[in-house]
Amino acid sequence: VQLLESGGGLVQPGGSLRLSCTASGFSFVNYAMTWVRQAPGKGLEGVSGMSISGGTTDYADSVKGRFTISRDDSKNTLYLQMNALRAEDTAIYYCAKATTMWFGATGDAFDIWGQGTMVTVSS
Amino acid sequence: DIHMTQSPSSLSASVGDRVIITCRASQAISGYLNWYQKKPGKPPELLIYAASNLQTGVPSRFSGSGSGTYFTLTITSLQPEDFSTYYCQQSHSTPRTFGQGTKLEIK
């Protein structure tokens, strides 16, 4: 059971990046997924989540209108398209599997996490 | 948004001690509260879900309790590998929100 993120790196303010998270060892198609980030020296912040079949999506206010979550079940892969990046988006981005099909379902939890990918927004 | 507040923010303890970390929600969330352990350079790990349910594989020295707005994470007989940062997270409504974290350090 594994999640592997990729796509992080150094980008200038205003730039774009697309993160990927490839799942293995479980039935990706049957679970909601999420992105959570941790800025340097800070705590955990939920960024975005998506239900099965590309259904319900949710975004933190801090990224709404700039980030887009998507998934390709044929590739067992979750994506996060990040546009108009700001210095405050600098963080390690983790993808995680929810314990339910529907993101935001009452009582869910995030039980499998990737190792994370670092995003640095700086000129 | 539901605001989660943990206390203390940091805590010093010794191997073998019993510690309690508290988490308060800004509004009632029933029992929809999860606890995660976060070590430097590692991803978070789910410890407790739905306030009091131990995740598979987590040692029984970890336990959780609470409902409504007040929750606790108790670790009995601290082991060296337990010194890390702990986060609560509410699963009552979106956006999912985390507490600010409690850093548990060796005394």
Image: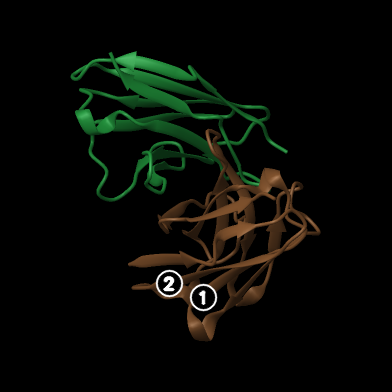
Decide which of B40, A100 is in the foreground and name it.
B40
Taking the spot 27% from the left edge, 43% from the top edge, the residue there is B58
Q: Write down the colour of chain A.
A: brown
Indicate left or right for B98 with A112 as reference: right
Q: Are marks 2 and 1 in contact (CB under 8 Å)?
A: yes
Q: Is residue B71 above or below residue A99?
A: above
In the image, what residue type sits under mark 1?
Thr
In the image, what residue type sits under mark 2?
Ala
On the image, the x and y values in percent for residue A35 come to 57, 57
Q: Which residue is mark 1?
A: A77
Q: Is residue B104 above or below residue A12?
A: above
Q: Earlier in the sequence, mark 2 or mark 1?
A: 2
Q: Is residue A101 above or below residue A64?
A: below
Task: Give the label on residue B13, or none.
Answer: none
On the image, the x and y values in percent for residue A26 come to 37, 72
Q: Which residue is mark 2?
A: A23
- Chain in green, by letter, is B
